[in-house]
Image (tube, grey):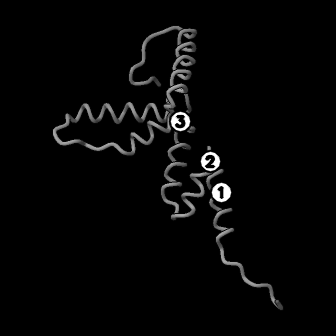
Amino acid sequence: ARGPAAVDEGPGDALIYLEVKKAVLDQTGISPETYRHRLRRSRFPAGARPRAVAQRIKEDCWRWLEPDQKTGGQVAEEVALEQFIQVLPPGGKEWVQRHRPKTLAEAVTLTEDYMSAERPRTPARGA
């Protein structure tokens, strides 16, 4: 799979390009997370052209998920992780987000830990 603005290049050129791109994005503070936020805030402005809106959404999606650098399974894991965090109840959601899990399994463990800590404690018998 190739990005929306892919250019034919040799394997060495592609590696150099990716290294330079990463360095530039690191310096500017732009990350895949930046594009995820842009994607989720997307709106259809009054008077906008459908193709332009669709292209901007597609570019943000590609830059967030980086499907040219990941397997289909990795992309699906990222989408599932985001959706899982979205459906969490308040409190748990903030807790999990604060810990920045990299996988769905990490997010589930964090959620279970949070729910365990929040569960009312029952007094010990005879106390």
The residue positioned farthest toward the right in the image shown: 126
Picture residue at 49% right of the left edge, 31% below the top:
30
Q: Which residue is mark 3?
A: 72
Picture residue at 34% right of the left edge, 36% below the top:
57
Task: Tell me if mark 3 has few (under 14), some (14-19) or many (20+) residues whose alpha carbon lies within 10 angstroms of its own.
Answer: few
Q: Which residue is mark 2?
A: 101
Quadrant holding the C terminus: bottom right
Residue 79: x and y, percent? 50, 45
Circles 1 and 3, Cβ within 8 Å, touching? The answer is: no
Along the viewing direction, whichever of 49 and 38 lies nearer the viewer: 38
Q: Which residue is mark 1?
A: 110
The residue positioned farthest toward the left in the image shown: 47
Q: Secondary structure at mark 2?
A: loop
100 sits to left or right of 41: right
Q: Secondary structure at mark 3?
A: helix
The earlier-in-sequence mark between 1 and 3 is 3
